[in-house]
């Protein structure tokens, strides 16, 4: 996959040249190209920003350098998406990372300063935000998104590592994990994990995944597709946690209130 970043601060991208992403680039699974769009500024002083028409605080990115930088990109062999980093975009989620990981090229446009000229929006296929807060620029947000996408490219996490069971895949948080020792200062690893009984381990993991999601992120539950085998687990969990408020949501999901008949 080719990732191209249009930025005024290419030197900020050192973190994506390290560790797993570095190895992915060395293995030819990922190329990261950094384009400083100041190089496309048309004025003598290479200005990339200007004051807003109508007045107001701060400076806005001018359209010409960004349009010129996009027009100068070589055509990718396959599907490309141009992403505008902006706190006004829809919030980045795991499904989006999964969907982007199948593309041939992703182009991130990183704004800086107070904002950008509205016409820059025309270039973008999508406008995406890292979260409901405002950063000084799109660079940190783009790095987070690059990391989330790159680890889903087949081969990037190595042969035996799988992203299938990650938190947020299927809208569920991942189950608790343990490694040796089985007894750490009296804190024991759940016995089922030592049993070698694969079906029981699978059941335990699914149940703990459901428990975690309900307890920590009940807001995610509406997007979960429950399987038939989940119902006995959900019933057990309701009994184990009757005192906890989020279970009300679960209970309502399991036993939806009967539809009221309309009275005429
Ligand atoms: N630029 C400024 N704030 C941002 C945010 N929350 N997400 C993406 N880009 C941004």
Image: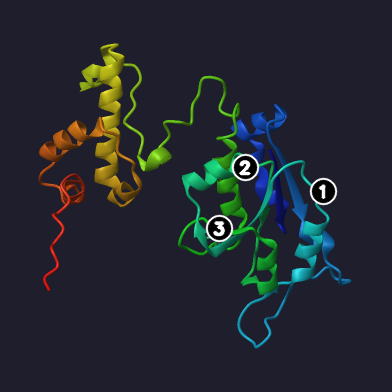
Q: Residue at x 60, y 48 (%)?
A: 143
For marks 3 and 2, the one nearer the N-term is 2
- Counting from the top left corner in percent of width and height, residue 154 is at 59, 29
In the rendered image, which residue does mark 1 sit on? 74
Ligand 1 near label 1 (Cβ, under 8 Å)?
Answer: no
Q: How is colour applied across the structure in the image?
A: rainbow
In the rendered image, which residue does mark 2 sit on? 15
Specify the farthest residue to the bottom. 54
Query: Left or right of 202: which side holds 68?
Result: right
Residue contact between numbered discs 2 and 1, judged by CB atoms under 8 Å:
no
- Counting from the top left corner in percent of width and height, residue 48 is at 76, 69
Ligand 1 near label 3 (Cβ, under 8 Å)?
Answer: yes
Figure check: 219 above or below 260 = above
Q: Residue at x 20, y 32 (%)?
A: 233
Question: How many residues crowd around disc 3 within 10 Å: few (fewer than 14), some, or many (20 or more)?
Answer: many
Q: Which quadrant of the rendered structure holds the N terminus? A: top right
Which quarter of the picture shows residue 150?
top right
Question: How many residues crowd around disc 1 within 10 Å: few (fewer than 14), some, or many (20 or more)?
Answer: few
Q: Is residue 13 visible?
A: yes
Query: Left or right of 25: which side holds 47?
Result: right
Q: Secondary structure at mark 3?
A: strand
Query: Left or right of 122: which side holds 230?
Result: left
Q: CA distance from mark 3 to mark 2?
A: 21 Å
Q: In what quadrant does ligand 1 lie?
A: bottom right
Depth check, mark 2 against mark 1: the one in front is 1
In the rendered image, which residue does mark 3 sit on? 128
Q: Kindly identify which numbered label has been placed on residue 84.
A: none
Residue contact between numbered discs 3 and 1, judged by CB atoms under 8 Å:
no
Q: Secondary structure at mark 1?
A: loop
């Amino acid at each position: 996959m080719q990732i191209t970043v249009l930025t005024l601060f290419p030197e900020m991208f050192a973190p994506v040249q390290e560790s797993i992403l570095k190895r992915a680039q060395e293995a030819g699974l990922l190329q990261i190209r950094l384009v400083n769009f100041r190089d496309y500024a048309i004025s003598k002083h290479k200005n990339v920003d200007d004051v807003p028409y109508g007045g107001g605080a701060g400076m806005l990115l001018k359209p010409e350098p960004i349009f010129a930088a996009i027009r100068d990109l070589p055509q990718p062999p396959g599907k490309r998406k141009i992403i505008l980093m902006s706190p006004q975009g829809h919030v980045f989620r795991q499904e989006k990372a999964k969907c982007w990981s199948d593309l041939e090229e992703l182009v991130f446009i990183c704004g800086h300063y107070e904002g950008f000229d509205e016409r820059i929006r025309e270039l973008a296929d999508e406008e995406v935000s890292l979260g409901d807060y405002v950063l000084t620029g799109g660079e940190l947000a783009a790095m987070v998104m690059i990391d989330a996408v790159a680890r889903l490219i087949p081969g990037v996490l190595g042969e035996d590592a799988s992203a299938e069971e990650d938190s947020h895949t299927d809208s569920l948080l991942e189950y608790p994990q343990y490694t040796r020792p089985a007894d750490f200062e009296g804190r024991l690893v759940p016995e089922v994990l030592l049993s070698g009984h694969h079906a029981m381990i699978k059941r335990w993991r699914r149940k703990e995944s459901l428990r975690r999601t309900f307890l920590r992120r009940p807001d995610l539950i509406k997007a979960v597709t429950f399987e038939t085998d989940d119902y006995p687990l959900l019933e057990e969990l309701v009994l184990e946690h009757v005192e906890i408020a989020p279970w009300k949501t679960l209970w309502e999901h399991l036993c939806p209130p009967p539809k009221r008949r309309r009275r005429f």
